[in-house]
Amino acid sequence: MKKIINTPDAPSPIGPYNQAVVVNNFVFVSGTIAMDLQSKQLVKTSIKEETRMVMEYIGAILKAAGCTFDNVVKSTIFLNDMNNFVQVNEVYASYFKNDFPARATIQAARLPKDANVEISVEAFVNS
């Protein structure tokens, strides 16, 4: 059985998808970018601030699904410029208290809305 997760505490999907889907105690969070919740416009300040926004949104989605960053087992980070890798890592690391999840980081030629960073995660829900 699958359960759709959408919360007003994270940006609404900009295409035919949901913020997350729960299946068999696993949460699959869609790629999330730094969009302002009110204006629905992309925020481009600094890569650290954009990453922080994305991680906060992911945290809100995980909470709506019944878990936290401690439940994340896999993440994928898409960057428009791999030169931002160190700065993104600094922010990303601050959201995990225990063991880090498995991860892939990929430089993409172009991200949705020309974002600088997009992150998706997979997690488990405690049963």
Image (cartoon, helix red, strand yellow):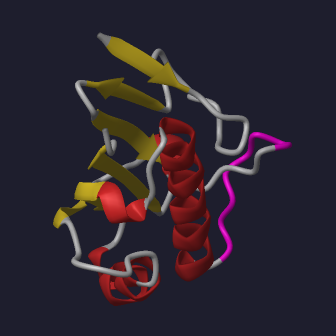
Q: Position of residue 22 (x, y in %)?
A: 35, 27
Q: Residue furthest right?
A: 38
Viewer-nearest residue: 118 or 73: 73
Q: Position of residue 60 (x, y in %)?
A: 60, 50
Q: Main secondary structure of the magenta part?
A: loop
User: Where the N terminus falls, by quadrant?
Assistant: top left
Viewer-nearest residue: 71 or 108: 71
Q: Is residue 39 magenta?
A: yes
Q: Is residue 62 above or below residue 14?
A: below
Viewer-nearest residue: 100 or 91: 100
Residue at image point 40% right, 63% down: 69
**Which quadrant holds residue 77?**
bottom left
Q: Which residues are magenta?
A: 38-45
Total numbered labels? 0
Relative horizontal placement of residue 78, taking residue 116 as reference (left or right): left
Q: Position of residue 71 (x, y in %)?
A: 32, 57
**Does any portion of residue 81 appear in the rendered image?**
yes
Q: Is residue 86 magenta?
A: no
Q: Residue furthest top?
A: 1
Residue at image point 31% right, 38% down: 127
